[in-house]
Amino acid sequence: MKKTKLLVEHQYEFELLGFVAPIKDYKMAWVVNNCLNINLVKTKDFELQFLDDSELKISQYILEKDHGYIQLLKNRSFSANGNALHLIPELKIMDYFMLVQDLTFDLNINAYIERLSKSSFIQNVVKLDVSKIKSKENLLTY
């Protein structure tokens, strides 16, 4: 019998920022809210089940906009046995990721980076190229 494979091409229509900021998730959301004058709200944790039966629960904050969203995701979680798991394993140095989608194309991501870099709580802000991330499918939380 001939087998057919379903190939799915995902669209990554968002800008991605990575943060090095060793602070609690609620504090990080507060920092982002103050720096960008927005109102990220805590939502249900994003749960990701892997093929090896390990489970990843990621803290997330989101702001729904008319033409997009801003989402803050924590990169690190701990399994039931205490092992550290990462949303994006190849970027373990990053503590948080911020996905910014603006379908009006009026967004100036460099202004966001500049404003966030001024915070004393954030050690580093980096714009990441989604196409170069091996486990980018983990960022599709919708």
Image: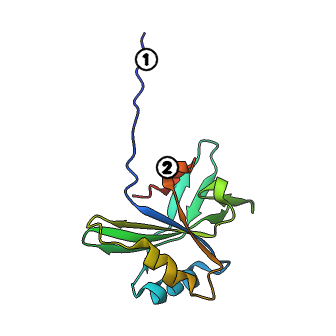
Amino acid type, callout 1:
Lys
Does residue 91 lie above or below 52 as drawn?
below
Tell me the number on the disc at residue 72: none
Tell me where residue 26 sits by quadrant: bottom right
Q: Kindly check if marks 2 and 1 are in contact, taking CB atoms under 8 A apart as contact.
A: no
Badge 2: residue crowd in 10 Å (few <14, some 14–19, many ≥20): few
For the question of whether residue 79 can be seen, the reply is: no
Residue extending farthest to the right is: 82
- Rendered-image quadrant of the N terminus: top left
Residue that label 1 marks: 3
Q: Position of residue 39 (x, y in %)?
A: 39, 84
Q: Measuring from the top left, give residue 84's x and y in whole percent.
A: 71, 61
- The residue located at (68%, 78%) in the rendering is 22
The crowding category of the residue bearing disc 1, from other C-alpha atoms within 10 Å (few below 14, some 14 to 19, many at least 20), is few
Q: Residue at x 68, y 61 (%)?
A: 92
Q: Residue at x 35, y 69 (%)?
A: 69
Foreground of the two, 18 or 113: 113
Q: On the picture, is 70 further left or further right than 116?
A: left
Q: Earlier in the sequence, mark 2 or mark 1?
A: 1
* Disc 1 element: loop
Name the mark on residue 131.
2
**In the rendered view, does 95 fall on the left or right side of 6?**
right
| Corner quadrant of residue 20 | bottom right
Q: Amino acid at mark 2?
A: Ser
- Quarter of the image for the C terminus: give it: bottom left
Q: Position of residue 116 (x, y in %)?
A: 52, 82
Judged by depth in the image, the label closer to the viewer, 2 or 1, is 2
Residue sitting farthest toward the top: 1
Identify the element where label 2 is drawn.
Answer: helix
Real-space Cα distance between discs 2 and 1?
29 Å
